[in-house]
Amino acid sequence: MGEGTAAVGGGAIVDLDLAALGDDAAGVFRALLEGVSSLSPDGVLKATVACDPAALGPALEARGLEARSEATDRGGTRLEVRSARASPEILDLRDLEAPEPLNCILAAAAELAAGGALIARTPCYPHPLLVLLARRGLAFEAIEEPDGTGLVHVRRPA
């Protein structure tokens, strides 16, 4: 993705819906690895799955990946997979009132070194933030999660 563009898929954030694979853990695992292969080193893969994510954890960890899961309100699971070595910590700003998430992300982005990145969870899809990031010349990608929250990846160009 180019600088100042919001996108779903490729680069810093890959978002997959693998629920149609059902309980096929091997198929889900292959799809996750394919998705991870298209990530930037500091990126994050989000996937909706129907299988038990506990079966995937050890195999992902063996490849230097960490996975976090949470149940969705539709009975599935939302996985978050990223490099255990290269990914920045994720700022969880979902419990903050506006405009605090926007202010926190802008402050953290101002501190990024050239080539540095940050990832943040926001209470909703951050339309106003994306405009401000673009004005500051920062590269970003954002997705809206099924629960209405947002996930934002911000990078200061090298």
Image (cartoon, rainbow, N blue to C red):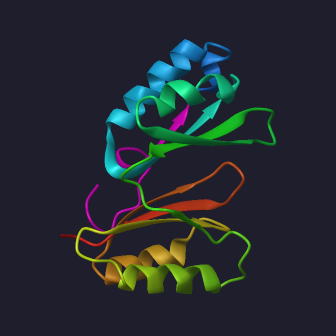
Q: Magenta stretch containing residue 106, yes or no?
A: no
- Start-end of magenta stretch: 1-17
Q: In which quarter of the image is residue 5?
A: bottom left
Number of callouts in the render?
Answer: 0
Q: Residue at x 46, y 24 (%)?
A: 31
For the N terminus, the quadrant is bottom left
Q: In which quarter of the image is the C terminus?
A: bottom left
> Against 130, is 64 above or below?
above
Nearer to the camera, 61 or 72 = 61
The one nearer the camera, 130 or 78, is 78
The residue sitting at 71% across, 78% down in the picture is 96
Between 125 and 79, the one nearer to me in the picture: 79
Residue 143 % position (x, y): 52, 55
Q: Residue at 49% across / 33% down in the picture?
A: 61
Relative side of 108 to 46, left or right:
left
The location of residue 83, given as percent across then percent down, is 41, 45
Q: In which quarter of the image is residue 19?
A: top right
Which of the pair 62/122 is nearer the observer? Answer: 62
Residue in the picture at 62% in, 20% down: 20
